[in-house]
Image: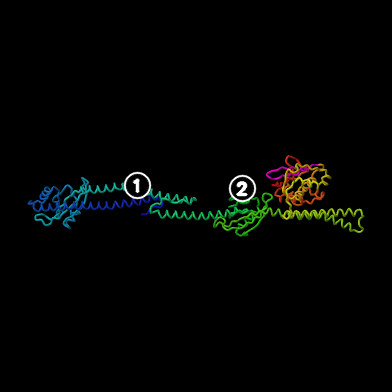
Amino acid sequence: MLISDNLSLKTKLFVVVLFLAVVCVSLPLALAYRQLNSDVVHEAESGAKEELALARRLLDKSDDSNIAVMVSSVSSLIGREIVFIGNDGELYSGASWLDSGGDLLNRPEVIAAVKDGTGFSHGTDPVTGNKVLYAAMAVIDLPDIPKGTLLIEEQIPKAGKSLETVRSVYLWSIPVIILLCYVSIRILVLQLSESVRSMVRTAEAVGQGNFKRRIRNLPGKEFLPLAESINWMAERIDEHVAIITGQKDKLQAVLNGMWDGVMVLDSECRINKVNRSMKEIVHGIEDSINRNPLEVISSPDFQDTCRQVISDDGPVSASIQLALDGDRVYEVNIVKSANSIGPGQGPGAIAVFHDISEIKRLEKVRQDFVANVSHELRTPLTSVKGYAETLLSDPPPPQTLQKSFLETIKKNADHMCKIVDDLLSLSRLEAGRAQTDFRVFDPVVCIEQAWEACSSLAEARGTVLESDLEDHENFIEADPDQLMQVFRNLFENAIKYGPEESLVEVVHRVDSGMLRIEVRDSGPGIPGSDQKRIFERFYSVQKHRRNEFGSTGLGLAISRHIVRNHGGDIWVESPPSGRSRGTSFIFTLPLAS
């Protein structure tokens, strides 16, 4: 029996079980019906045969010579209508149930009786509608009676009622069987459905990422292997996911631990993943996943280089320099990676952002340093060379000019010596090789010595010093000579670049164990763009005025290294807080314990 695949399991089970139940009920009932029908007919035939045999014996014993009267007498004796038909077809005695107009010799039971001695046929009573049995017996050996056939009709109503009862039982059993099958299948399917739903829920949970989900209530034997397989599958998936997650976490930890920024691109040149350093380099890039790099970094060259590396015929790696956030410069190395997202999706790329801003800055400082040293030495050397050539000329200059030329040569030579001495001093400070003599003392002493060294310059410009530091108020542990050099450099700048007849102030305060000293002037100030570089070597805001005072351009760089070597810091504020002009150089030193 073929069942459509579109039907549900419940329907299929119902159809199969119902079919088997109907077959199992129908076969016994059909056999019983057939056997009962056979028994009833056999009983009717036996009764009819006995009655015909009795009628034959009564005819044999009858003394009447009229065959019609004899048959009528026998009918009266046995209480049944008996028909006698001669072999020539003559009807000697009729009956109400017999149609005498037909060919009586061709009746089935008559033909059988002539052949075998007795014969039977079945029919329906036209009056009652009941089934009847027609029986016939041949009469061939009775004296004084012509050869012929006796016929009798046997009613079988009892047999019909029994068969109808069997048929009714069969017809009524069908709905009962259907109901029982439906209820049984319903209960069975509910049990199976619950087991199946439990397994389906577990499989769905595993598919949605809940790899700890298991089938706790194992179903019957039918689904036990399937349930165990699902649990085993979930355990294996959980183990593999744990391994993959661990590897992913390790890789992410490595990426996040890198100082360099890392950007992973897929085969469509879209951002797939970034590390923590990359998030710090480009703020908000974590919200740009699955977007093109050009949407985050405004560099068409970077976008084009990434596409070239990702392309099938592109290079394995490429490098490009990017300037981000103005002063940050990055060396970006782009390397092709096979199947960055998944197998069959083509190669991707990994871009590593290496910050070379400090290298670029140091390179620029080196270039500037070489250029500045060359410039600072070229100017006095040119002057020395020119005056020397003049002195050596023929005829030589007048005696009065020779002394002036020699003084100029000495002045420029002293300036070059000062530059060289400052460079050597700065080099020793940077390398930590400068000789230091740390002692506890009052910084007022250094202030007085530094101002005394600048007294000639201060008197020439009419500059006056004013300090709020008092004797024996604060003590520091430092190198007095180096600290005096810091004050001298700051005082010289304040005197040189401040207006004439002005005031240089020294103010202080103590904060968290540090002595904070501020040197103020009322000069034109330092532009904000120059304040970041004011402590670089040879850097000057007013370059045209540096040679006017014989400055080397190294004083502030030396001061910064001295202060930092003493555990403090130095910076500039221009204009100072609460003023509209002027400059304040502020540095801190730790107080003596």
Q: Nearer the viewer, residue 423 or 190?
A: 423
- Residue at 87% x, 53% y is 407
SS at badge 1 = helix
Mark 1, residue position:
183
Which circle marks residue 284 in the picture?
2
Residue 513 in magenta? yes
Q: For this view, does 142 lie left or right of residue 413?
A: left
Left or right, residue 194 beside residue 524 = left
Q: Name the spot of residue 227 as percent of width and height, x first.
A: 42, 53
Q: Report the front residue among 36 and 77.
A: 36
How far, Cα to Cα, is label 1 from label 2? 64 Å
Give the residue drawn at x 63%, y 59%.
317
Q: Is residue 441 left or right of residue 134?
A: right
Task: Give the magenta-colored segment's residue range.
Answer: 502-522
Amino acid type at circle 2 is Gly
Neighbour tally class for label 2: few under 14, some 14-19, many 20 plus, Cα within 10 Å: few
Farthest residue to the left: give it.
63
Residue 550 location (% of width, % of height) = 81, 50
Way the structure is coloured: rainbow
Q: Can you tell which of label 1 and label 2 is closer to the viewer? A: 2
Q: Position of residue 157 (x, y in %)?
A: 20, 47
Position of 519 compared to 320: left or right?
right
Furthest residue toward top: 578
Residue 365 location, x and y as percent?
A: 73, 53
Q: Quadrant of the N terminus?
A: bottom left
